[in-house]
Amino acid sequence: AQSVTQLDSQVPVFEEAPVELRCNYSSSVSVYLFWYVQYPNQGLQLLLKYLSGSTLVKSINGFEAEFNKSQTSFHLRKPSVHISDTAEYFCAVSENNAGNMLTFGGGTRLMVKP
Amino acid sequence: DSGVTQTPKHLITATGQRVTLRCSPRSGDLSVYWYQQSLDQGLQFLIQYYNGEERAKGNILERFSAQQFPDLHSELNLSSLELGDSALYFCASSVDNRGYGYTFGSGTRLTVV
């Protein structure tokens, strides 16, 4: 069975500083990987995804994540964060032989301070 | 607006009662997924329907059931409610059965008192 571990439950960071949110997964088969963002009192929004091809994937608002098969990781990074990036970030995995079900990590609360 | 509509947004009910949560998927999406988000369990997959048929089942209690109607909207029925059923219930949709990233609704917050 697949599982996802987000190593940090909270990450405080100052505005304009870089940030990395860590995600590790375990699965016995090939996987698809996702990062979702949840702003306060809202649903989850897909931030970026890895299905195949280039292991570095980017979002339109400056986030990027790199799939590392040997490390079974999919860490999320941003070189310079804004106050508006304050939210909960969820890493998720689905096994690509039956990609119906997403297994989510416990979430990382990113708190950007002025 | 994600295009996935969930009603009601908030629901407060007593233990032992039954409630129905409704979800309308994005236009053109055939798959509907239900997830439960609680403080102790995190985000848990409940069930998926594709074009009216059940396709995948997760950690869904026997007291819970769902269906997808011919117009593709879906309902999640929760019965014999317990305090521990208090949670955010999300619906998501995708165009196919492969789940290459869903679009989520804004959720229904259920409070059982």
Image (cartoon, rainbow, N blue to C red):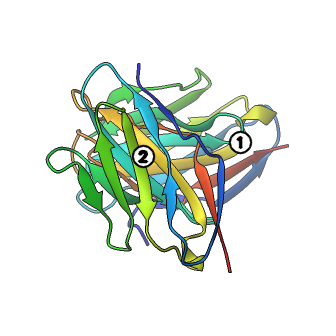
Host chain of mark 1: B
Q: Quadrant of residue A95?
A: top left
In percent of width and height, residue A103 lies at 45, 34
In percent of width and height, residue A71 lies at 36, 33
Closer-to-camera residue (A18/B4)? A18
Closer-to-camera residue (A91/B42)? A91
Host chain of mark 2: B
Closer-to-camera residue (A70/B79)? A70
Q: Which residue is mark 2?
A: B74
Name the quarter where the N terminus of chain A is drawn: top left
In percent of width and height, residue B74 lies at 42, 46
> B61 above or below B53?
above
Closer-to-camera residue (A109/B47)? A109
Hey, what amino acid is under mark 1?
A: Leu
Can residue B69 be spotted in the picture?
A: no
Q: Which residue is mark 1?
A: B39
- Within 10 Å of disc 2 (Cα), the crowding (few <14, some 14-19, many 20+) is many
Q: Secondary structure at mark 1?
A: loop
Hey, what amino acid is under mark 2?
A: Ser
- Within 10 Å of disc 1 (Cα), the crowding (few <14, some 14-19, many 20+) is few
Q: Residue at x 48, y 34 (%)?
A: B45
Q: Secondary structure at mark 2?
A: strand
> B71 above or below B46?
below
> B60 above or below B5?
above
Q: Residue at x 52, y 30 (%)?
A: B65
The numbered mark, 1 or 2, whose residue comes first in the sequence reads: 1
Q: Quadrant of residue B87?
A: top right
Asked if both marks, 1 and 2, belong to the same chain, the answer given is yes
